[in-house]
Amino acid sequence: MTQTPTTHSRSAERPARTANGILMLLLGLLLLVGGPIGVAQDPQNAFVVVAGVLTGVVGLLLLCGLYSLQPNEGMAILLFGDYRGTDRKTGLRWVLPWYSRKKISLRVRNLTSDKLKVNDKRGNPIEIAANVVWRVEDSAQALFDVDDYQAFVNIQVDTGLRDLASHYAYDHGEEHELTLRADAEEVAARLREELSGRVKVAGVVVDEARLAHLAYAPEIASAMLKRQQAEAVLAARRLIVKGAVGMVETALLDLGEREVVELDEDRKAAMVSNLLVVLCADREAQPVVNTGTLYG
């Protein structure tokens, strides 16, 4: 007979039943002070002494149930390990003194991960780090479904970054392919979605996630810089040649329309060659003085 595996039931936050702490503070002080005063009035009466002591003890116990909460804080209430709810009401609060309490911050937190050395989609070693803005949404899951929710978030951020880098190239991707450097917004959205799914089990919500550092690893940074410089030079050359061809074409059309000079095919070819040399050269053109004819 086989047994079906049992799935772990996740905790879910629910409101706790607590009381106003100001009223319980006044009542506790009244009992704590009133008990000794009653004993002092009739110390020979055993019943009065016992009642006064019990009154003082009750007042002390009432004071032990007090706690305070600031905005964006929660207090998980437990009874002998059994979760009884979370109190999010600010100010001085009170619960039965035999209930144990665990305070948890619900404020927004900022995490900057360590620089990780990983391989991108093309196998190039890169350094990558992220800045993540997160907060606890479900206090019960954060406290009881994971051992340490802050350490859990840190580990998941590192894991998510490694997974993200493996799906994108650093730059120079294929046609219409997203890259880590050129498509920051899309990559940030993918990272936020990835991390949100990973930390959901801990009751944590990721509000924002962006790359804080992105660079080639030192051992290939010099080679990649040379490649980027070469590609920049080629792109500039393409633009220069394209512009030069347009200028030559415009010059020939203007000369023909204005009938400044009649050019046969050989002269046009020579003029085009000279103009392209002048326009595309790295250095300034050196004039050549022709003392004869064009064909001399």
Image (cartoon, helix red, strand yellow):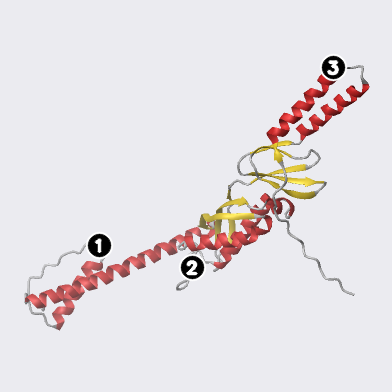
Between residues 94 and 151, which one lies in front from this camera angle? 94
> Of callouts 2 and 1, which one flags the residue occurring earlier in the amino acid sequence?
2
Q: Is residue 77 above or below residue 275?
A: above
Q: Which mark is residue 178?
A: 2
Q: Residues within 10 Å of mark 1 (few under 14, many from 20)?
A: few
Tag 2, which secondary structure?
Answer: loop
Q: Name the image quarter holding the C terminus.
A: bottom left
Q: Amino acid at mark 2?
A: Leu
In the picture of the structure, the residue carrying the numbered disc 3 is 40
Taking the image as shown, residue 263 lies to the left or right of residue 106, namely left
Instruction: Determine whether, in the image, residue 52 is placed left or right of residue 154.
Output: right
> How far across and down, in percent of the image, does residue 226 sit?
43, 62
Q: Is residue 232 left or right of residue 214?
A: left
The residue to which callout 1 is attached is: 283
> What x and y, as percent, mark residue 12?
71, 56
Q: Residue at x 74, y 30 (%)?
A: 27
Q: Position of residue 152 (x, y in %)?
A: 68, 54
Depth check: give the residue in front, 164 or 209: 209
Contact, mark 1 vs mark 3 (Cβ under 8 Å): no
3 or 2: tag closer to the N-terminus:
3
State the quadrant of the N terminus: bottom right
Q: Nearer the viewer, residue 209 or 166?
A: 209
Q: Of tags 2 and 1, which is closer to the observer?
A: 2
Q: Secondary structure at mark 1?
A: loop
Report how far apart the C-alphas of labels 2 and 1 lie in the structure.
38 Å
Real-space CA distance between mark 1 and mark 3, rounded to the nearest whole angstrom:
108 Å
Residue 295 x, y percent position in the rendering: 11, 79
